[in-house]
């Protein structure tokens, strides 16, 4: 998922939650049952999760361009840290 896809997913998620909250509140107020408000909110949450959590192709339209891989160098310089010149002088007596 790219950055624009993340932004789109967040907007869809928030929009569905907001719409389901308003619909649930109005419906629950109309029939005087708070439980229906909660059920409608949970249904909106489930739908928004289904639409935003999987990596759908609509969220991957703008892929990031990565830097090319650095080729590995062979040799002992990578494996062993180099000793400091002052440490070598101290070893000699």
Image: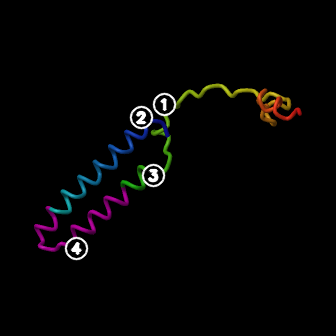
Provide the residue designation for mark 3: 53
Mark pair 1, 4: CA separation: 42 Å
The residue located at (85%, 29%) in the rendering is 75
Badge 2 or badge 3: first in the primary sequence: 2
Comparing labels 4 and 2, the label whose residue is closer to the camera: 2
37 relative position to 72: left or right = left
Disc 3 to disc 4, how far (Cα)?
26 Å
How far across and how far down the image is residue 73, in percent?
80, 27
Near mark 4 (Cα within 10 A), the count class, few <14, some 14-19 or many ≥20, is few
What residue lies at 22% left-to-right and 73% top-to-bottom?
35
Asked whether the residues under the numbered discs 1 and 2 touch, taking CB atoms below 8 Å apart as contact, a structural biologist would say: yes
- Identify which residue is drawn at 16% across, 68% down: 28
Cβ atoms at labels 1 and 4 below 8 Å apart: no
- The secondary element bearing badge 1 is classed as loop
Task: Pick whichever of labels 3 and 1 is earlier in the sequence.
Answer: 3
Tell me the quadrant of the picture where the C terminus can be found: top right
The magenta stretch spans which residues? 26-47
Residue 63 position, x and y percent, is: 52, 31
Dominant SS in magenta: helix
Q: Circle 1: is it few (<14), some (14-19), or many (20+) Cα within 10 Å?
A: few
Question: Which residue is labeled 2 in the image?
Answer: 4
Question: What is the distance, in whole Å, between disc 1 and disc 2 at their CAs?
Answer: 7 Å
Please tell me whether residue 58 belongs to the stretch shown in magenta.
no
Of the residues under marks 1 and 4, which one precedes in the sequence? Answer: 4
């Amino acid at each position: 998922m790219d950055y624009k896809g993340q932004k789109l997913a967040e907007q869809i998620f928030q929009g569905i939650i907001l719409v389901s909250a308003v619909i649930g509140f109005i419906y629950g107020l109309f029939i005087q049952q708070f439980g229906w408000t909660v059920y409608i909110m949970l249904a909106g949450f489930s739908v928004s999760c289904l639409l935003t959590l999987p990596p759908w192709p609509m969220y991957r339209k703008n892929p990031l361009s990565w830097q090319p891989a650095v080729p590995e160098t062979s040799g002992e310089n990578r494996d062993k840290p180099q000793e400091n010149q002052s440490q070598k002088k101290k070893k000699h007596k």
